Amino acid sequence: MQLMVLAGLGLALMAPWLHRRLGERSALVMAAWPLALAGWLAFQGPGILAGDTLLLEWRWVPALDITLTFYIDGLAWLFAMLISLIGAMVLVYTSEYLKGERDLPRFLVIISAFMTSMLGLVLADNLVTLFVFWELTSITSYLLIGFHHQDPAARRSAQQGLFVTVGGGLALLAGLVMLAQAGDSWSLAVLIQRGEQLVGHELYTPMLICVLIGAFTKSAQFPFHFWLPNAMAAPTPVSAYLHSATMVKAGVYLLARLHPALGDTTLWEMTLSLVGAVTMATAALLAIRETHIKKLLAYSTVMALGALTMLLGIGTPGAMVAFVVFLLAHSLYKGALFMVAGILDHATGTKDVTAMGGLRRVMPWTAGIACVAALSLAGLPPLLGFVGKELMLASLLEALPYGGLVLALAFLGAFLTLAVAGIVALKPFFGSLGDTPATPHEAPWAMLIGPALLAGLSLVCGLLPGKLDGLVTGVVSGLGVSDPNVHLALWHGVNPALLLSLASLLLGTLVVRYWDRARGVLARFDRLAAFGPEQGYERLMAGMVHLASWQTRWLQNGQVRHYLAMTLLTLMALVGHALFIRHPGPLAFHVDAYFHEVVVAGLMAAAALTACLMRSRLAAVAAVGIMGFCIAMLFVLFSAPDLAITQLLVETLTVVLLVLVLFRLPRFTRLSTPLERCRDLLVAGSFGLLMTLFMLGVLSADALPRISDYMVANSQPLGQGHNIVNVILVDFRALDTLGEMFVLALAAIGVQAMLRFHADEQSDPATPGRRPDDG
Amino acid sequence: MVRSGTLILSVAARLLLPLQLLFSVFLLLRGHDEPGGGFIAGLVAAGAFALYFFAYGQYALNAMLKVSPRDLVAVGLLIGLISTLPAWLAGEAFFTAQWWSLPVIGIKVSTPLFFDIGVYLAVVGSVLTAITALADTAQASDASN
């Protein structure tokens, strides 16, 4: 199973090749993979829904207790099924939608990678694995939103989506680590059994807040809702798939998954139901303002996500059933509606619903699908959306004692959703034929089949809700409801929920009728957007750029002298702290030294002083060279031949490099004022003094166990070499050496890039090819 | 700026280059037991090429090397990385040294040796990259002056 899921990554790698061989049909061929997955899931379905769970283990990083384990219970099964089925439909749809698009292979690569990560996310048992897949979905989503990267708006939206979700991801990581600490396990299957231990833990509140931030950003809950409508810059199949049916539900999935572990506390209930309800109402109000069809749908997605969060917050068995049904219904109709939006965009060349009209006659099939899906969105019988909405209202009424505000907000959301559904279904297809940039035509079968299947499923499930009992029971039992007694029905008789539905139908119809006027009224509040969360995001980003440029100007002003002073001061602070505060100890002021050692040291000091005072560069270089050779001599005196050889060679090559550089430099001038020179002298002098004290301190701390003893003792038996330095370099500390090699390579590339860049700036464009070794 | 040097330098460079390179290989191979090793050997080799470069100029050096120094860096890094694989195949921790002895000649061959060869190439390549890049700019500004 793991291999089947990970095969998606292989498929992603193969996509360009497939595309070259098969052309546009490659998307159709690739749809076979999610279909195969769906088949496997369907085969496992009866067992899992009856209450079995599958635990497929594959040890990945045993040392860190990270496993690529898949834990499949009802909840994971439902999500995986939706992801693979809708994924297959989206691929089929894409084969037509992006026909002739030059970058289709790139699209296919990213979308299969996304499918894999999404499946991994909902199936993962290990928290680390879950987080890895979580971040992968953020990254692939970023690439997909910015698919039309020539468009600055798309780039901006992609970046916004990335920053918001990845920022939340960071919080989530902290939350998951705390979760694992408190629950003493990295396995979700174990953690959801330990609810009481987690809820009682002292870390419960911070852990919950972190996890919630992660989930809320991903699922576009208030106040992070703004990124989702902007994400509509993505190609429509992406919107249908990522930003309605799957990725944005990842946050909701995580909350549902952790409900048995973290739920059932006042904090959980209050936060989730309030945030969910506020999200619903905000999104509903924002939706009515929009005329861009995809943004309308996007806001209604935010509304649905709010509703799902709210239901999880209420947490009664009834609410859990409503959660599952609503989730299923939403995936079906929203997928269909987004695909319809794409068809409309293709056929008319505009995304503005006010520009469309009367398309019913030209595009009868599309119109039919849109109407069925919109009825489900509106929550009207006989569709699955109606069943879901009834259950939601009923569970809200059950929870009434403390849920008055929540109910009011949810009711507002419900009737405005109905209005959105009315606008989406009625405006483009009825009335007089609108004046659109392109001549409308019916869509090809590959674009119709996906939405038709989804809308058809909404209808069938709505007519025969009893057939879903088993499914819903299976999923709900994974949500911590112990004794689910699920009987879905279309008709519950006249009850308060039905009355609320009727009221929302009435109000919704009114909003559709007077939509233009409602937009006008809401437009007056546009000024409020200046205080909205999106502005907050913009300010934050601008502030970060500001801070970064300020600190860059301050720290990296281009003067080597300045860099050196900064580095030395930092080092001084750290070393001084270690020496005097953390490990204050005696300093060994009495040092034994032979006469010749003192002579070499004195020579070095003299050379250093000369280098500072010289007014000729060549003389300064020579003085520095003397210092280098003196150091080499000290190495020889202390019997370290390897170091001595290295030092000598480095000195030699330094001279070579300096010779190459020296003659290119401008005339020697004094750039600094005497005061600055005094300051530099102070920094350099105190650094020297500190290092001397440090060495004296080290000499006196002889009692500490020394790693070099181990190296000396084990060089021959373990490393099979007599040269300890070399054994350390290539065996004991080989990883460090590998890192150093990369640093070396980077430095070389850096030197070359800097010089090339400089040379290209100066060089005369009229004489190209002056450097025959180019490339 | 850097042109062919004097006659003495040219002849010396021509004669010294093979010796220096031989010496660098000697240092590289004996490094595990005696002073030496990939880093030192790499510096010696780079010094040898630098001498040749001063004697004959940059084009002669490029013509003799035949590969770009940057490629040497890349190959060095690759060899360093590949030398970690045998440990993985043997099921041991990353970077665990593996030793084999060749049956006929009786020489010990090991992953640290290959790793050291990687270090050698990376050092030679990096130093030469820096030198040729500097010489390039010198050439370029000479030409524009």
Image (cartoon, rainbow, N blue to C red):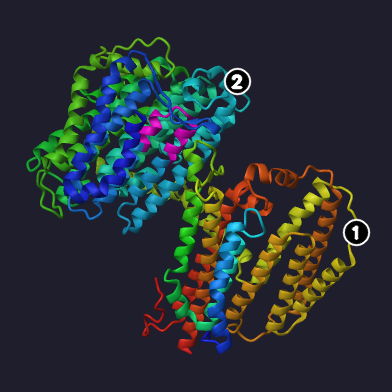
Where residue B81 sits: x, y (%)? 49, 50
Q: Which residues are magenta?
A: A117-135
- Tag of residue A759: none
Give the residue type at disc 2: Gly
Q: Does residue A296 appear in the picture of this structure?
A: no
Who is closer to the viewer here, A270 or B97? B97
Who is closer to the viewer here, A703 or A412? A703
The residue shown at (23%, 28%) is A376
Give the crowd class for mark 1: few <14, some 14-19, many >=20 residues within 10 Å: few
Q: Is A60 on the left or on the right of A513, as rendered?
A: right
Q: Earlier in the sequence, mark 2 or mark 1?
A: 2
Give the crowd class for mark 2: few <14, some 14-19, many >=20 residues within 10 Å: few
- Tag of residue A200: 2
The residue shown at (34%, 53%) is A154
Where residue A282 sits: x, y (%)? 39, 38
- Reading the image, the residue beneath label 1 is A592
Specify whether residue A132 is painted magenta: yes
The image quadrant where one finds the N terminus of chain A is top left
Q: Residue furthest right?
A: A590
Specify whether residue A628 is painted magenta: no
Who is closer to the viewer here, A376 or A510? A376
Up-down relation of residue A751 to residue A613 (above or below): above
Query: Judging from the image, what secondary structure is the residue with disc 2 in?
Result: helix
